[in-house]
Amino acid sequence: MSTNQTNRSAQTLHVYRAEMIRVINGANLGDSLSFADELVPDDVYRLSPLAATVRMRVQTGGNPPFQIASDTDMGLPGADLHLDCCVTFMSPSGETVECLVLVEVDEDGNVAQIYTLPLGKMTPNAEYVLVGVNSDNALQRFAQVACVSFTAGTMITMANGAQRPVEDLAVGDRVLTRDDGPQEIRWLGHHTARAVGAFTPILIREGTLNNTRDLLVCPDHRLFIYQRSDEIGAGRSEILVRARHLVNDITVMPVTGGFIDYYQMLFDSHQIIYAEGIAAESMLVDTRTGAALPDDMSDKLGELIPGHRRSGFGELEVQETLLTRPDVADLLRKSSTG
C-alpha cells in the first residue's frame, strides 16, 4: 500500500460493489462481476434490487495505479486501485451500457475488493447480458469521464475579446486565460457520448453564476469563482467548485437523454479560461486524462507541452461538505458580486 498521496488529483466515483451484480444464467452462474480473465461473454447478470452506488474518492498522480483517498466512503484509504477492463452489457430492451471494473489490492498485491463504475444508467433488479469485455480501452473510457469538457455551442472568449463556439476552435487559436493572458491551443479533443450516467452534462442557467448565457459542461468541470465575501466558509477568496456540486434542480440541473458532444482544450499548462462569461478550467493532463490524447502526442507530451503538469489548482478546490446546501449557487453568485 502506498502512503504518498501528495500532489495528486482527486475525483469522486459512484461505484457498485461487484457482488451487487451476479450471474443468474450462464457459465459463471452465481458469481459476481469480476476482472477480465474470469468473465464469459453471454452470461446473464442481474443488478441486485438492493443495489445503490456508493461514493469512492480516488487520487491519481503521474503514474498508475490510482489510490483510494482518505475521505472515501468505499474502499480502504491508501490502497492501490487498478483499472482492469471495460465491460459492455445489453439490457432486455436492446440498449447497451458500459461499466469499468476497478480492482482494489492489498499490500501484497492480492485482490481485496472489486468495484463496478457504471458509465450509463443501470436499473436494480434488471437483467443484463455481457456482450463485450475490453482490457485495452478501459483507461481511454475513464479518461473521457475524467476530462473537463465543454459542450457544443459553448462560447469561448478569445484573446481579442471575441466570442467563438468551442466546436469552431482550432489548434493555434489564441484564447484569453486568467493567469497568463493570450495562450495558444495546443490540442483539441472531441467525443460524442450518450447523456446518461457519468456522461450526463450539468446545465447552469443564464445568470446563475453571472454567466451571460446557459452553460452546459461535464459533471466534474471546475468553475473558478473570486469571492468578494466568503459566503460558504472556504477560508479564501479564490475557489474552484465542480459543476455537479451546485445542482439544485432549479438553476443548476443534470440534462439526461439523447447524445452530447464534448470538447476538450489543452494549453501549454493548465489554465483558467472564460466560457459564457465565467471562468472555468481547461483540461489537465494526469493519470486519469492522459489516455484521451493521441498516442503520438502522449508519448512526447513533455516536449510538446512542457508545462502540462504545472499545477492542477488543487489547493483552490472547495471541499464537497461546504457545498451540500440547496442555495449554494445563489450564495456563490452573491459572493462574487457583493
Image: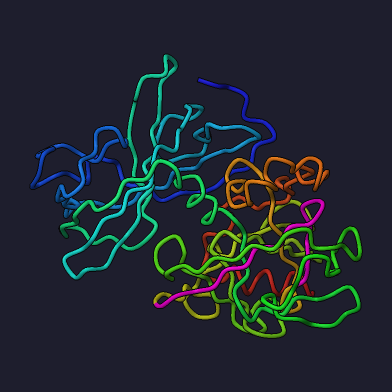
The number of numbered discs placed on residues in the rendered structure image is 0
Figure check: 85 above or below 186:
above
Furthest-top residue in this view: 108
The image position of residue 233, as x and y in percent, is 68, 55
The image position of residue 197, as x and y in percent, is 40, 63
The overriding secondary structure of the stretch rendered in magenta is strand
The image position of residue 214, as x and y in percent, is 62, 83
Residue at point 62% right, 29% down?
Answer: 5
Q: Quarter of the image for the C terminus: give it.
A: bottom right
Magenta segment boundaries in residue numbering: 258-274
From this viewpoint, is residue 233 visible?
yes
Residue at point 69% right, 35% down?
Answer: 7
Residue 210 occupies quadrant:
bottom right
Residue 216 occupies quadrant:
bottom right
Taking the magenta stretch, the answer to whether it contains residue 263 is yes
Residue 315 occupies quadrant:
top right
In this rendering, position of residue 234 left or right of residue 123: right
Figure check: 181 above or below 208:
above
Residue at point 77% right, 71% down?
Answer: 274
Taking the magenta stretch, the answer to whether it contains residue 98 is no
The image position of residue 94, as x and y in percent, is 22, 68
Figure check: 170 above or below 8:
below
In this rendering, position of residue 107 left or right of residue 126: right
From this viewpoint, is residue 231 visible?
no
User: Colour scheme in the image?
Assistant: rainbow
Task: Decide which of 265, 232 is in the foreground and name it.
Answer: 265
In this rendering, position of residue 110 left or right of residue 77: left
Task: Decide which of 1, 302 is in the foreground and name it.
Answer: 302
Residue at point 54% right, 51% down?
Answer: 143
In this rendering, position of residue 217 left or right of residue 210: left
